Image (cartoon, rainbow, N blue to C red):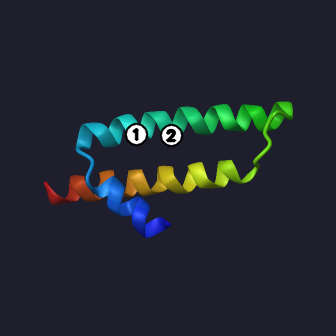
């Protein structure tokens, strides 16, 4: 799964990566709030969002290094 996710993310432009980062951070915040209020059914969702956010930020850092 992780290799496929990275392949999909590598095809995104810099602006798309920034947009994806914002979306993931918002989703992570919303998911954490659902957990606190007891509305979250899938607690593994937080873990998955954190990993995907880390992948996106890694690609952003790599892109900055290439310039």
Q: Is residue 29 left or right of residue 35?
A: left
Question: Percent position (x, y) of residue 63?
Answer: 23, 54
- Image position of 45 with respect to 27: above or below: below
**Residue that badge 1 annotates:** 20
Quadrant holding the C terminus: bottom left
Which labelled disc corresponds to residue 24?
Answer: 2
Disc 2 element:
helix
Question: Percent position (x, y) of residue 26?
Answer: 55, 32
Q: Is residue 6 left or right of residue 47?
A: left
Query: Going 34% across and 56% down the picture, which residue do you hit?
Result: 8
Q: Is residue 12 left or right of residue 28?
A: left
Disc 1 element:
helix
Which quadrant of the structure image shows residue 40?
A: top right
Q: Nearer the viewer, residue 10 or 4?
A: 4
Question: Percent position (x, y) of residue 54?
Answer: 48, 55
Query: Which residue, as the protein is rendered here, is positioned at the far left?
Result: 67
Image label count = 2
Marks 1,2: beta carbons within 8 A: yes
Cα gap from disc 1 to disc 2, whole angstroms:
6 Å
Query: Going 23% across and 52% down the picture, which residue do you hit?
Result: 64
Query: Going 65% across and 55% down the picture, which residue do you hit?
Result: 47
Query: Going 27% across and 48% down the picture, which residue do you hit?
Result: 12
Question: Percent position (x, y) of residue 55?
Answer: 43, 57
Q: How many neighbours does mark 1 have within 10 angstroms: few (below 14), some (14-19), or many (20 or more)?
A: some
Q: Nearer the viewer, residue 1 or 62?
A: 1
């Amino acid at each position: 799964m992780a290799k496929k996710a990275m392949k999909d993310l590598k095809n995104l432009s810099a602006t798309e990566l920034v947009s994806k980062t914002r979306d993931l951070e918002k989703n992570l915040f919303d998911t954490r709030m659902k957990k606190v209020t007891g509305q979250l059914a899938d607690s593994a969702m937080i873990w998955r969002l954190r990993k995907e956010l880390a992948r996106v930020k890694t690609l952003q850092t790599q892109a900055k290094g290439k310039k």
